[in-house]
Image (cartoon, rainbow, N blue to C red):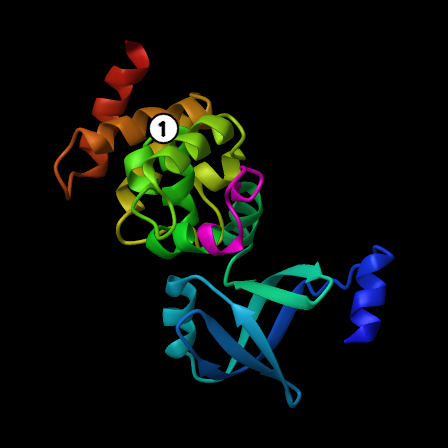
């Protein structure tokens, strides 16, 4: 590993942006992707690992590469939106790769973006390694910094749990409301509503929040 230490000391970065290959194995916190006979260890969120374990054939993962003096760590994501939010989360002090992946293990990128923008620190605090204070810091520091594409749509951003929330945010955005204000209103409406509330009701509740 001497070449790696020397390269890291000189500030040289080895970037892998995408891996395409077969899933050789899936473990608790990583998968091994076989690319032309070379097995790459890729750390992923639990939701991504669950998806990979069900794959039969070639898969593609967007990669965030971390180079240190003694290691190269690959973090893999099924969608670019997940990778982008992973990077944004780590701009907060106290949030490293493991914590960011922990957050993305319990919610989709859209869920996390809506929760952060809406100040729903209780939802964020449910992730492994995230206490109440850190969750509050994440929401406070990232409020207003989440790109609109992570709030309203995005490749693969929808999930069964958040489809109503996403649809409500998108509908409000189509009505002319700024994406972040719409997401904040919808997030507050979700917090005050019972599980399984419809998109239409969320829109009505969010409109009341926006009008107040």
Q: Can residue 209 be seen in this view?
A: yes
Magenta highlight: main SS: loop
Residue farthest to the bottom, as pictured: 37
Q: Which of 30 and 163 is in front in this view?
A: 30
**Quarter containing the N terminus:** bottom right
Q: Name the residue under label 1.
A: 119
Indicate yes or no whether the magenta region holds residue 91.
Answer: yes
Bounds of the magenta segment: 89-99
Indicate yes or no whether the magenta region holds residue 147.
Answer: no
Q: Nearer the viewer, residue 145 or 155?
A: 145
Q: Where is residue 132 in the image (x, y as percent from the top left)?
A: 33, 36
Residue at 50% across / 28% down in the picture? 141
Q: Position of residue 105 (x, y in %)?
A: 38, 57
Under tag 1, what secondary structure?
A: loop
- Quick check: 41 above or below 111? below
Q: Where is residue 116, by image quadrant?
A: top left
Q: Position of residue 27 (x, y in %)?
A: 42, 77
Residue at 52% across / 46% down in the picture? 85
Q: Is residue 12 visible?
A: no
Residue at 85% across / 66% down in the picture? 6
């Amino acid at each position: 590993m001497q070449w790696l230490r020397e390269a890291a000391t000189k500030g040289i970065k080895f970037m892998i942006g995408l891996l395409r290959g077969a899933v050789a194995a899936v473990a608790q916190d990583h998968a091994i992707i076989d690319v032309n006979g070379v097995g790459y260890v890729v750390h992923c969120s639990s939701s991504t690992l669950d998806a990979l374990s069900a794959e039969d054939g070639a898969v593609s993962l967007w990669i965030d590469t971390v180079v240190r003096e003694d290691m190269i760590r690959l973090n893999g994501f099924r969608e670019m939106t997940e990778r982008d939010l992973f990077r944004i989360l780590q701009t907060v002090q106290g949030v490293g790769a493991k914590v960011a992946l922990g957050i993305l293990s319990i919610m989709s990128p859209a869920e996390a973006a809506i929760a952060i923008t809406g100040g729903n620190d209780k939802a964020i605090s449910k992730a492994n390694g995230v206490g109440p204070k850190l969750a509050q810091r994440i929401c406070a520091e990232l409020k207003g910094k989440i790109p609109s594409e992570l709030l309203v749509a995005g490749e693969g951003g929808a999930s069964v749990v958040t489809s109503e929330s996403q649809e409500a945010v998108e509908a409000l955005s189509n009505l002319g409301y700024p994406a972040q204000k719409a997401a904040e209103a919808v997030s507050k409406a979700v917090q005050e509503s019972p599980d399984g509330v419809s998109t239409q009701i969320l829109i009505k509740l969010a409109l009341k929040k926006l009008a107040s």
